[in-house]
C-alpha cells in the first residue's frame, strides 16, 4: 500500500513539475509560485506520512 501511495505522489509531483516548467516558460510567475507552494506541501505531507 505504501508503494502505491508513493507512486501516486511521484506521479502528481512529476505533473506539478511539468506545470511549473510550462508556467515559467510562459511567463506566468504567479502560477509558478503557487505550484512551488503545492510541491512543498506535498513533500511535507509525504514526509509526515512516512515517519
Image (cartoon, rainbow, N blue to C red):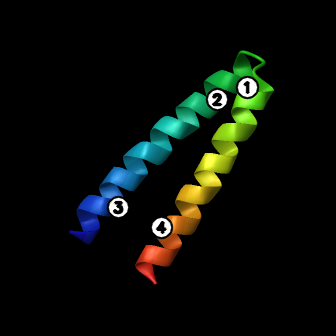
Q: Position of residue 14 (x, y in %)?
A: 47, 42
In the shown orientation, is residue 3 left or right of residue 17? left
Residue named by callout 2: 21
State the image quarter where residue 18 is shown.
top right
Position above or below: 44 against 51: above
How far is disc 3 from disc 1 in space, using C-alphas?
27 Å
Q: Earlier in the sequence, mark 3 or mark 4?
A: 3
The crowd level at tag 4 (other Cα within 10 Å; few <14, some 14-19, many 20+) is some
**Do residues under tags 4 and 2 come within 8 Å of each other at their CB atoms?**
no
Q: Earlier in the sequence, mark 3 or mark 1?
A: 3
**Do residues under tags 2 and 3 come within 8 Å of each other at their CB atoms?**
no
Q: Position of residue 23 (x, y in %)?
A: 67, 24
Residue named by callout 4: 46
Q: Which mark is residue 6?
A: 3
How far is disc 1 from disc 4 in space, using C-alphas?
25 Å
**Do residues under tags 2 and 1 come within 8 Å of each other at their CB atoms?**
yes
**Do residues under tags 3 and 4 come within 8 Å of each other at their CB atoms?**
yes
How far is disc 4 from disc 2 in space, using C-alphas?
22 Å
Q: Position of residue 29 (x, y in %)?
A: 79, 27
Position above or below: 14 against 51: above
How far is disc 2 from disc 1 in space, using C-alphas?
5 Å
Of marks 3 and 4, the one in the foreground: 4
Observer-nearest of 24 and 37: 37
Assign a secondary structure to mark 2.
helix
Which residue: 42% across, 78% down? 50
Q: Position of residue 26 (x, y in %)?
A: 71, 15
Which residue: 40% across, 54% down? 9
Residue named by callout 1: 24
**Do residues under tags 1 and 4 come within 8 Å of each other at their CB atoms?**
no
In the shown orientation, is residue 47 left or right of residue 10? right
Q: Earlier in the sequence, mark 1 or mark 4?
A: 1
How far is disc 2 from disc 3 in space, using C-alphas?
22 Å
Amino acid at each position: 500500500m505504501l508503494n502505491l501511495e508513493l507512486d501516486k505522489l511521484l506521479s502528481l509531483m512529476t505533473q506539478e513539475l511539468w506545470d511549473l516548467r510550462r508556467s515559467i516558460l510562459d511567463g506566468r510567475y504567479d502560477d509558478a509560485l503557487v505550484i512551488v507552494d503545492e510541491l512543498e506541501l506535498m513533500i511535507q505531507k509525504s514526509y509526515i506520512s512516512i515517519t
